[in-house]
């Protein structure tokens, strides 16, 4: 059984290595066709002539894949209460078919709620790297988590 992360589990400075995902050209094109139909995301010939030299994933697709890796890796089904938003997203280099993304969750700040003692906010940075260890995307944001229920083990 994978660990369920609760608010009480986060400590500023901790780094949590999460799962990975290999990206296919088919999924890049399918996502972009629906949500970001720029030629370098959906058209192989146009992409080859672009500054990218080939099809690349939409930055929004990269963020969505990172979200999935975080949710799968942190077992947030019981404790996640959503997010009030993001402070920043940076697309550092293109994600291409065949790239394998790995995500690291870096806890920046933890703040218990002063009005709702059953929860708190965790500020974090997610760093996605490719198979060469090169950063491709960072997300700075925050999430609300439930506190660990009384009597629940770690």
Image (spheres, grey):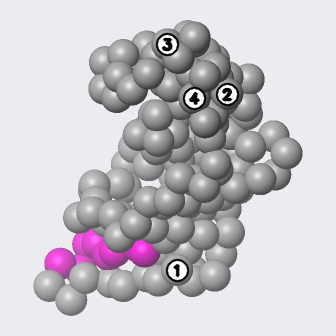
Q: CA gap, disc 4 to disc 2?
A: 5 Å
- Taking 36 as reference, is 109 above or below it? below
> Crowdedness of circle 1 by 10 Å Cα count: few (<14), some, many (20+)?
some
> Crowdedness of circle 2 by 10 Å Cα count: few (<14), some, many (20+)?
few
For discs 4 and 1, the disc positioned in front in the rendered view: 4
**Residue occupying the point 68% across, 69% down:** 15
Circle 3 — which element? loop
For disc 4, the marked residue is 50
Mark before the other along the chain sequence, 1 or 3: 3
The x and y percentages for residue 46 are: 53, 17
For disc 3, the marked residue is 43
Mark before the other along the chain sequence, 1 or 2: 2
Identify the residue at the far right of this view: 132
Identify the main secondary structure in magenta: strand
User: Is residue 69 among the parts visible in the rendering?
Assistant: yes
- Taking 106 as reference, is 13 above or below it? below
Q: Which residues are magenta?
A: 116-123
Identify the residue at the far bottom of this view: 114
Q: Where, quadrant-wise, is the C terminus in this rendering? A: bottom right
- Taking 61 as reference, is 14 above or below it? below
Mark before the other along the chain sequence, 2 or 3: 3
Q: CA gap, disc 1 to disc 3?
A: 39 Å
Q: Image quarter for residue 24?
A: top right
The x and y percentages for residue 118 are: 26, 72
For disc 1, the marked residue is 108
Q: CA gap, disc 2 to disc 3?
A: 12 Å
Q: CA gap, disc 4 to disc 1?
A: 37 Å
Q: Is residue 56 left or right of residue 17?
A: left
**Residue occupying the point 51% across, 39% down:** 62
Circle 1 — which element? strand
């Amino acid at each position: 059984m994978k660990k369920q992360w609760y608010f009480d589990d986060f400590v500023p400075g901790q780094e949590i290595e999460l799962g990975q995902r290999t990206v296919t050209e088919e999924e890049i094109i399918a996502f972009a066709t629906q949500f970001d139909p720029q030629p370098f995301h959906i058209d192989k010939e146009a992409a080859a002539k672009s500054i990218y030299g080939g099809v690349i994933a939409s930055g929004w697709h990269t963020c969505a894949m990172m979200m999935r890796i975080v949710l799968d890796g942190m077992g947030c089904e019981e404790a996640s209460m959503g997010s009030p938003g993001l402070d920043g997203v940076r697309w550092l280099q293109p994600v291409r078919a065949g790239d394998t993304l790995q995500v690291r969750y870096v806890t920046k700040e933890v703040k218990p709620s002063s009005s709702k003692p059953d929860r708190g906010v965790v500020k974090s940075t997610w760093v996605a790297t490719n198979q060469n260890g090169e950063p491709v995307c960072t997300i700075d944001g925050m999430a609300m988590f439930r506190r660990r229920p009384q009597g629940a083990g770690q």
